[in-house]
Image: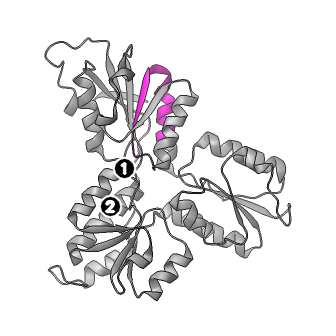
Amino acid sequence: MTATTFDTLSAGPVNGSTPADKRVLLLKPRGFCAGVVRAIDVVKIALETFGAPIYVRKEIVHNRFVVNELAEKGAIFVDDIDQVPEGMRVIYSAHGVSPAVRQQSKDRRLKVIDATCPLVTKVHVEAIKFAKQGYSLVLIGHRDHDEIEGTLGEAPDVTQVVSSAKEVETLEVPDPDHVAYLTQTTLSLDEARDIIHALKAKFPKIVGPHSQDICYATENRQVAVKNVAHTADLVLVVGSNNSSNSNRLVEVSRNLGTNSHLIDNSNAIDPKWLDGVSTVAVTAGASAPEVLVEDVVVYLRDRGFGSVEEVEVMPENVRFGLPPEIVQAIQSAPSSPASV
């Protein structure tokens, strides 16, 4: 773990009055993951290539700032496929969709661009594999999350969702010796570990994925919080309320005994949170843009936290290629935006 000065936001004391002992620890990695960058790029490129409007099923990523910014550029966000006019172009969000949604799109002759995160697609593929092999499937995650809805749709007749270790106690399956589990990609590592432990105790022969389903970005941001929570009086997590991985960062901090809050932006900070605080750690969920983090740091500097250190816990250099639909669309599109 290394600490470096965050030069762009630590130009010195504000009005010459900053106490040296009040500081901000800016965690790294933080913010956008590769899947989020890819999904946002897909919408932007589609708008540039085809022109507005471009329809997007659900929020492309779970961040209101990002969604509003794309809406201003011409993206139209809808909850259901039947809200997209027949024959128009629609983008699936990073969280993935069920086969039923894909069939709806086909029935409405929609031009689909799939921005599902490749790591979510991995879980879908695993669900299909286990179902074909005759396993009862336990999906660990939050029932109302878009990602769980999509994955559950791959094999709904054999899949049950559990959200806690306690729920495992009441699970019933046709054959206890033929059970498999998968997890939502944005869970708390500790939470998932406890549920998997309970599943293995109840079903000793249960099998799981070859590699964990919790994504690298979720894990890295949680590890970063764990590394600095003991040195901070307060942890601020930039992210929207419906962002699963952002909420998990708050939980990780609180479970370690460090006060933590989820904030959409600097306007959500309660000044009372800073009373008696000398060190604030700041991080961001995988769908939160860096501009919001910068605003939070400026807010803290204006209130006496003049020392800003960027603490890198581990490097993160993952990149995902664009989906084939958008690559082919770019190659075949005319040089200027065209109507669809």
Do we see residue 6 in this rendering? no
Q: Where is residue 333 in the image (x, y as percent from the top left)?
A: 23, 83
What residue do we see at 46% from left, 48% from top? 217
Residue corresponding to mark 1: 32
Q: Which one is in front, 73 or 49?
A: 73
Q: Vertical placement of 102 versus 285: above or below? A: below
Q: What residue type is labelled 1?
A: Phe
302 drawn magenta: no
Q: Quadrant of the N terminus?
A: top left
Classify residue 148 by image quadrant.
Answer: bottom right
Q: Position of residue 87 (x, y in %)?
A: 35, 87
The magenta span reads: 221-240
Residue corresponding to mark 2: 40
Question: Mark 2 or 1 closer to N-term?
Answer: 1
What residue do we see at 85% from left, 60% from top? 176
Circle 1 SS class: loop
What residue do we see at 26% from left, 78% from top? 330
Disc 2 to disc 1, C-alpha distance: 10 Å
Q: Position of residue 218 (x, y in %)?
A: 50, 46
Q: Is residue 255 left or right of residue 109?
A: right
Q: Position of residue 327 (x, y in %)?
A: 32, 76
Circle 2 SS class: helix
